[in-house]
Image (tube, rainbow, N blue to C red):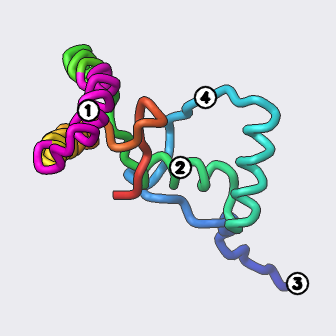
Amino acid sequence: MITMSKSPTRKGGRPSKQTDEKRTHVVTIKLTDAEHADLKKRSKDAGVKLAEYVRHGAFRLTIVSRLTEIEKEIARGILNLSSDFNQSMTCFHQLKLCSAANKLAAVVDRMFDILKKLRPNKETDYVCKNP
């Protein structure tokens, strides 16, 4: 009678990840049906799983913080001057004071450049942009 010795059995499947590569934390977000469908479609179009798509988006984007109260007050003050500026420009042009109008326009352009630095995209309170 012949006896066969068993070879050590190996566990099937993928090898275990190293401890520093394992993901152990879960973040839950609530989405509307439309948002969820949009995310699923985008991840499918990209050819990745939904979790990987969201993870990639979360770590590849930079969110610019909202304006502070002081910055909001400064921006509001400057924007409130726009009607005064328009009236002044109209008056300058009617009086044929083009050089003064050009100087005033240059000053206002500089003020708006400062505003753009405070708030790069005036349509939203924060801006997502690729680094």
| Local secondary structure at mark 3 | loop
Q: Is residue 84 above or below residue 123?
A: above
Task: Say which mark, if any, is on residue 91.
Answer: 1
Mark 4 — residue?
28
Is there CB contact under 8 Å for labels 2 and 1? no
CA neighbours of label 3 inside 10 A, class few (<14), some (14 to 19), many (20+): few
**Whole-number angstrom distance, CA of label 2 to CA of label 4:** 12 Å
For the stretch drawn in magenta, what is the main secondary structure? helix
Q: Is residue 41 left or right of residue 130?
A: right
CA neighbours of label 4 inside 10 A, class few (<14), some (14 to 19), many (20+): few
Ranked by sequence position, the earlier of labels 3 and 1 is 3
Question: Which segment is the magenta one?
Answer: 78-100
Q: Is residue 55 left or right of residue 115?
A: right
Mark 2 — residue?
55
| Residue 79, horizontal then vertical, whole percent | 31, 25
Mark 3 — residue?
1
* Residue 59 in magenta stretch: no
CA neighbours of label 1 inside 10 A, class few (<14), some (14 to 19), many (20+): few
**Whole-number angstrom distance, CA of label 3 to CA of label 2:** 60 Å
